[in-house]
Amino acid sequence: MHRPPPSRLARAAASLALLSLGAALGACGGKKLGPPVPASVNIVSGDPQTLLAGTPASIPLVASILNSDGSPVPNVPVRWSVSSGGGSLETVVNTTDANGKSSTIYRSPAKVGTATVSASAAQQSRQFTVLIIADTTGSLFAYGGNGAAALVGVPLTLTARATDRFGNPMSGEDVNWSSSSGQLQLASGTTDSTGKTTNVITVGPDTGSVSIVATSRFNSVTFTVFALPSS
């Protein structure tokens, strides 16, 4: 049976179909379909920063999620966690915004030190570092030498210590000293990294109790020592 040759219109339609199929196959072979895959977690801001003990950070921790060509990836889940140093986070899981960014607020513990916070997404992570220092509210107290006794003319060492409201040592605090009698070695001093400052008093010539006052910007503390007769 003899078939008539296909019409010009039929041949054109077949050619167009073949071209469309080839374009589709080429697209599949040369480019992966589907959403972009997160390639890296990057720190945008908040690292490093210094924070007072027991307070929330004023600067958020911000991370960005980028794909392999460096463009931001939105709607990616990000998990935040405190890796070391204690403290807490305002948000532990959220998703990146239209600019590929995610953020949280860190609150420091009552103890000074260094904390590390991790932002994790798509098996990648980055660490933020926060230095926690003593709070600005504190007090001075007698740490050593209060109630001691010595012979007239014999020196006694006195130690005052400054701590914040959580008990963390406060360094760099100025302390002024005064005494009801005897001879103080120093008129003033500054607390060291452990929050301590020392002074030496040589009691005498009178015997009996001696009051020594150490004064800081927080408060004053009184030491009482006793001068004993030398013979």
Image (tube, rainbow, N blue to C red):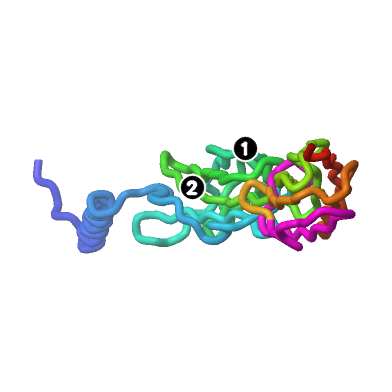
Q: Secondary structure at mark 2?
A: strand
Question: Residue 138 at what x, y percent from top left?
Answer: 80, 50
Please name the residue shown 46% across and 48% down the image: 126
Q: Position of residue 41 (x, y in %)?
A: 45, 51
Residue 219 visible in the picture: no
Give the distance between the C-alpha atoms of the residues marked 2 and 1, in whole angstroms: 14 Å
Specify whether 64 is left or right of 16. Answer: right
**Mark 2 or mark 1: whose residue is earlier in sequence:** 1
Residue designated by label 1: 86
Q: Amino acid at mark 1?
A: Gly
Q: Is residue 18 left or right of residue 136?
A: left
The residue indicated by pointer 2 is: 127
Residue at 59% x, 45% y: name it.
113
Residue 132 placement (x, y as % from top left): 63, 49
Q: Nearer the viewer, residue 211 or 1?
A: 211
- Up the image or down, 19 lies above or below 110; here it is below
Would residue 168 be counted in the magenta stretch? yes
Q: Which residue is depicted at the point 47% across and 59% down?
A: 72
Q: Amino acid at mark 2?
A: Gln
Judging depth in this view, the residue of 45 and 98 nearest the camera is 45
Q: Are marks 2 and 1 in contact (CB under 8 Å)?
A: no
The mark tally for this picture is 2
On the rendered image, what quadrant is the C terminus found in?
A: top right
Residue 1: image quadrant is top left
For the magenta stretch, what is the residue range? 164-190
Residue 204 in view (yes/no): yes
For the point 52% across and 57% down, which residue is it?
100
